Image (cartoon, grey):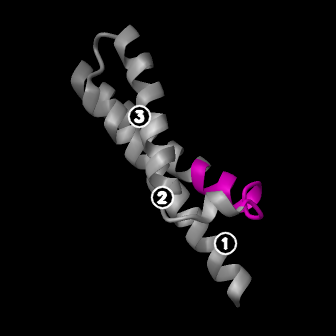
Amino acid sequence: MLQIVLLGAAAVAVLLAHVKARQYVRGRLRFVDSALQPWAPWVAGAGAAALAAVAVSVIPVLGAGTAIAFGIGVGSGVHWGARDVKRLSSG
């Protein structure tokens, strides 16, 4: 039962990471050229995964997969946010 709850919490964290990163790029970073570069999602995702790894090491119940999934959520949010900015500015 605890594993199901932790899996749900991890899924919610990944979803929120994606949504918040996408909103942040669309709202605050829309005029920052480096946030719209192709490498930006990779850097943001790696940084988020590294920070999440530190947090996960404190909580022994969660594993490295949670940190990696969180990094993927942030990276995909940055990617889709930059894509939204490019689409809205070109049209």
- In the image, residue 24 lies in the stretch drawn in magenta: yes
Reading the image, the residue beneath label 1 is: 85
**Image position, residue 15 (x, y; %):** 46, 47
Label 1 – label 2 distance at C-alpha: 16 Å
Of mark 3 and mark 2, the one earlier in the sequence is 2
* Kind of residue at disc 1: Val
**Image position, residue 42 (x, y; %):** 43, 51
| Vertical comparison of 59 with 42: above or below | above
**Image position, residue 68 (x, y; %):** 33, 37
The residue depicted at 34 percent of the width and 41 percent of the height is 69
* Kind of residue at disc 2: Trp
Q: Are marks 1 and 2 in contact (CB under 8 Å)?
A: no
**Image position, residue 63 (x, y; %):** 26, 23
The residue depicted at 48 percent of the width and 46 percent of the height is 43
Is residue 90 shown left or right of residue 65? right
* SS under mark 2: loop
- In the image, residue 52 lies in the stretch drawn in magenta: no
The residue depicted at 69 percent of the width and 87 percent of the height is 90
Is residue 11 shown left or right of residue 3? right
Q: Residues within 10 Å of mark 1 (few under 14, many from 20)?
A: some
Q: Nearer the viewer, residue 61 or 31?
A: 31
Q: Which mark is residue 67?
A: none
Of mark 1 and mark 2, the one earlier in the sequence is 2
Q: What span is colored magenta in the figure?
A: 21-32
**Numbered disc in front, either 3 or 2:** 2
| Vertical comparison of 54 with 70: above or below | above
| Vertical comparison of 12 with 91: above or below | above
- Residue furthest to the bottom: 91
* Kind of residue at disc 3: Ala
Reading the image, the residue beneath label 3 is: 49
Reading the image, the residue beneath label 2 is: 39
Label 3 – label 2 distance at C-alpha: 16 Å
